[in-house]
Image (tube, rainbow, N blue to C red):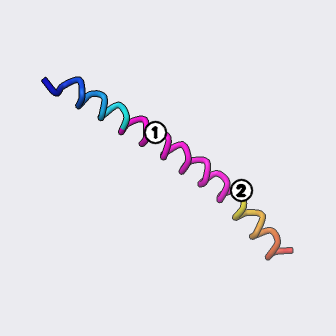
Amino acid sequence: MDSPRIAAATDSAQGRAILLTRRRSKDSKRRKKKTPSLEEQYEA
């Protein structure tokens, strides 16, 4: 009876998780780009 509702909930949860992972990956890439620049500033 509730299988479609559960499926929809899982799909939405997976979609949210994917969006969060994408945001985290973007943030991590930005942080990786920022960290070497800061290190270069300290070295220079």
The residue positioned 46% from the left and 39% from the top of the image is 18
Q: Position of residue 14 (x, y in %)?
A: 38, 36
The quadrant holding residue 13 is top left
* Amino acid on which disc 2 is placed: Lys
34 to the left or right of 11: right
Farthest-out residue, right:
44
Residue in the picture at 24% in, 28% down? 5
**Quarter holding residue 38:** bottom right
Q: Which residue is mark 2?
A: 33
Q: Which residues are magenta?
A: 13-33
Q: Above or below — where is 5 with respect to 43?
A: above
**Crowd around label 1: few <14 · some 14–19 · many ≥20 (10 Å):** few
Q: Is residue 29 magenta?
A: yes
Residue sitting at x 23%, y 31%: 6
**Residues marked 2 and 1 touching at CB (< 8 Å):** no
The quarter holding residue 43 reads bottom right
Instruction: Please tell me whether mark 1 sits on a helix, a strand or a loop.
Output: helix
Q: In terms of depth relative to the viewer, which is nearer, 8 or 24?
A: 8
On whether residue 31 falls in the magenta region, the answer is yes
Comparing 39 with 9, the one in front is 9
Q: Say which amino acid is labelled 1.
A: Ile
Which disc is residue 18 wearing?
A: 1
The kind of secondary structure element at disc 2 is helix
Q: Residue at x 72, y 61 (%)?
A: 34
Measured as percent of width and height from the top left, residue 35 is found at 70, 64
From the viewer's perspective, tell me whether residue 20 is left or right of residue 41.
left
In three-dimensional space, the C-alpha distance between marks 2 and 1, rounded to whole angstroms, equals 22 Å
